[in-house]
Image (cartoon, helix red, strand yellow):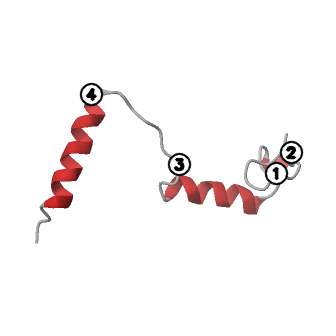
């Protein structure tokens, strides 16, 4: 199984990654929002609308 970050062979200790570096790169992508999933849950739509309203009307 190739590493999803650099395509090298994965290492059992870091599977599915080849190294700690690639595992950390992947974690960084999760933490900064590079990865996302589309949700069709109506409750999530309410959260998105509320955050958009806050962005357009910031509180000082």
Name the residue carrying label 1: 7
Q: Residues within 10 Å of mark 3 (few under 14, many from 20)?
A: few
Task: Using the numbered discs, state the Cα–Cα distance from disc 4 to disc 1 in whole angstroms.
Answer: 37 Å
Quadrant location, the C terminus: bottom left
Q: Is residue 60 above or below residue 56?
A: below
In the picture, the disc for residue 16 is none
Q: Do the CB atoms of the residues marked 3 and 1 lie less than 8 Å apart?
A: no
CA distance for labels 2 and 3: 24 Å
Q: Position of residue 14 (x, y in %)?
A: 79, 50
Q: Residue shown at 16%/60% (left/top)?
A: 56
> Residue 52's x, y, as percent?
22, 52
Q: Secondary structure at mark 1?
A: loop
- Report the disc number at residue 12: 2
Q: Earlier in the sequence, mark 4 or mark 1?
A: 1
- The residue carrying mark 4 is 42
The tag earlier along the polypeptide, 4 or 3, is 3
Q: Quadrant of the N terminus?
A: top right
**Residue 16 on image: x %, y %:** 77, 44
- Foreground: disc 2 or disc 1: 1
Dot 2: within a 10 Å radius of its alpha carbon, few (fewer than 14), some, or many (20 or more) residues?
few
The residue sitting at 48% across, 44% down in the picture is 36
Q: Earlier in the sequence, mark 2 or mark 4?
A: 2
- For the residues labelled 2 and 3, say whether their Cβ atoms are less than 8 Å apart: no
Residue 10 shown left or right of residue 42 in the figure: right
User: Is residue 32 left or right of 39 when viewed as pictured?
Assistant: right
Of residue 38 and residue 16, the one placed in the foreground of this image is: 38
Report how far apart the C-alphas of labels 2 and 4 lie in the structure.
40 Å
* Residue 40 in the figure: left or right of residue 10: left
> Residue tagged by mark 3?
35
């Amino acid at each position: 199984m190739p590493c999803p970050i650099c395509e090298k062979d994965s290492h059992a200790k870091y599977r599915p990654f080849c190294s700690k570096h690639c595992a950390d790169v992947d974690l960084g992508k999760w933490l900064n929002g590079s990865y996302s999933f589309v949700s069709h849950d109506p409750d999530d739509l309410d959260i998105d609308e509320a955050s958009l309203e806050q962005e357009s009307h910031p509180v000082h």
